[in-house]
Image (tube, rainbow, N blue to C red):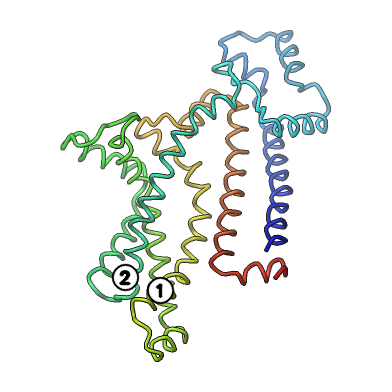
Amino acid sequence: MGTYIVKRMMAIIPIFLLATLLTFGMIQLSPVDPAEAYLAAAHIQPTEEMLEQKRHEFGLDQPILVQYVNSIIKICQLDFGISYISNKPVWDEVTYRMPATIQLALGSILLAILVSVPLGFLAGIKKNSGIDYFSRFLAFFGASIPSFWLGYLLIFFFSVKLNLFPVEGIGTVQHLVLPSITLALPLIALYTRLLRASVLGNLQEPYVLFARTRGIKESIIMGKHVLRIAISPMITGLGMNLGKLLTGTIIVEAVFSWPGFGRYFIEAIFNRDIPVIQCYVLLAAGLFLISNLIVDLIQMYIDPRISRKGGHSQ
């Protein structure tokens, strides 16, 4: 098992280096001059002398390979440069805003799990029942409706009409409810379908028939065996969506004026704040890699055969 974990962690390094190379390449190919963008963000009319000075400060007059190596060294030191807008280190700005995004993402994941696990499991063991039809409708609705439209609908009914929740901002549990529902509904639709299909497939497996013939209680068969095996595809889907959720809160944060990293990224795009954009892209890649690693470890705990197949360490 230890060998498998080490291999999975080592596999992250070349993938992340590839992400840095692609990010660096896109910035180099971009028609936006970082020096010109910096001066424009500072509302300074650029001259050729000022542009040359800023290019020298940013190291843009050095060879491409030197620039790339220097950027890798700075990234390893969590130095993503200075924001063109705030004139503060980008990493400080990110660490200030990231807790709000993490809070929103975790609230959405928790809500999605609490709803989709029992709903998908019951829909699977009670096929063609009322709860099964309800789960299908919810899955279809959640997969079809755009997040921004759902957010505005929730604001209109629950904030404007009923005055139950705040329209925007952060600070209380009430502020978290509507954004979490907006983010969680597509996840609920996905996880409910995955778990329902997995439960239906596992109910046809021989081990269920053998367990019943041995006289094991139905509740033990369903809960200890079927659910444990059937939930594996859902965990995989959770890992694939965790990084996406943390970086995909952009629209929801904009709709609910949530002061998170996604909203900060939107402002950076409009202001051509290149260091912030670069930091966001690399953080997104890192979050995807880490979340997939965590899910692999959870999958290995649920099914130890994974470590034997991947690392041959058992």
Quick one: quadrant of the C terminus?
Answer: bottom right
What is the CA distance from the residue labelled 1 to the residue labelled 2? 9 Å
Q: Secondary structure at mark 1?
A: helix
Side (left or right) of 143 relative to 71: left
Q: Locate residue 48, reporting x and y percent.
A: 72, 10
Mark 1: give few (<14), some (14-19) or many (20+) Cα within 10 Å. Answer: many
Q: How many marks?
A: 2
Q: Quadrant of residue 188?
A: bottom left
Q: Against 30, is 216 above or below?
A: below
The label number, if any, that marks residue 123 in the structure image:
2
- Label 2 residue SS: helix
Side (left or right) of 174 relative to 74: left
| Residue farthest toward the left in the current orientation of the protein | 162
Q: Which comes before the other along the chain, label 1 or label 2? A: 2
Instruction: Tell me if label 1 and label 2 are in contact, CB under 8 Å.
Output: yes
What amino acid type is highlighted by mark number 2? Ala
Amino acid type at mark 1: Val
Residue 285, above or below 198: above
Residue 229: percent from left, percent from top: 48, 72
Residue 24 image position (x, y, % from top left): 71, 35
Write down the residue under mark 1. 199
